[in-house]
Amino acid sequence: MSDLPQSVLEPVLVEEAQRHGAELRFSTEFIDLEETPRGVATTVRDRQTGREYSIRSRFVVGADGARSSVLQALDIPVIGKQINTAFHVHIKADLSKYIQNRPGSLNWILNPDAPDWSAVGNFRMVSPWNEFV
């Protein structure tokens, strides 16, 4: 398990994958795939231009979460249930005057008057006093 925000972890993973010969594409949408005798032919769409094209590879990695289009294309079920709704916000703001004397890097916010979906939250420090998720 990693306790790093995507903004910190992703560049490390990208660099290591490229070091091992992987080609990565960003701003690219998965459309479909077809297994071939030599691997996979994947159809993708460039989100900047709208152009669709095919990529041939030995395998496909679907790192797009539980609602993955890759999982759907392969008819792979996600077993389990959603037990909570969550969203992440990456912020850069100087909060030192509010938290610099607190020893932890995880802070909880409780608001019993807020709607159910927003009554409890937390923010975790990425970089002391000015970067949080």
Image (cartoon, rainbow, N blue to C red):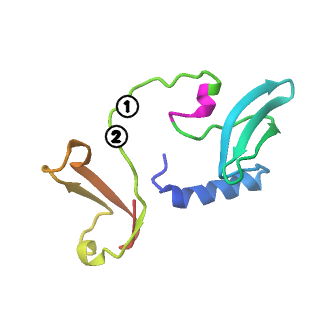
Q: Quadrant of residue 11?
A: bottom right
Q: Locate residue 83, reporting x and y percent.
A: 33, 33
Q: Locate residue 82, reporting x and y percent.
A: 37, 31
Residue at figure coordinates x 71%, y 36% from the top left: 60
Residue at figure coordinates x 73%, y 30% from the top left: 33
Q: Give the left or right position of residue 66, taking residue 119 as reference.
A: right
Asked if residue 30 is among those painted magenta in the image, a careful observer would answer: no
Q: Locate residue 67, reporting x and y percent.
A: 51, 33
Q: Amino acid at mark 2?
A: Thr
Residue holding disc 2:
85
Segment tinted magenta in the rendering: 66-72
Residue holding disc 1:
82
Towards the viewer: 48 or 39: 48
Residue at figure coordinates x 71%, y 43% from the top left: 45
Residue at figure coordinates x 65%, y 24% from the top left: 74
Q: Give the left or right position of residue 75, taking residue 113 as reference.
A: right
Q: Amino acid at mark 1?
A: Gln
Q: Can you name the residue that lies furthest to the left here? A: 113
Q: Quadrant of the C terminus?
A: bottom left
Asked if residue 70 is among those painted magenta in the image, a careful observer would answer: yes
Towards the viewer: 115 or 101: 115
Marks 1 and 2: CB-CB under 8 Å?
yes
* Above-or-below relation of 20 to 133: above
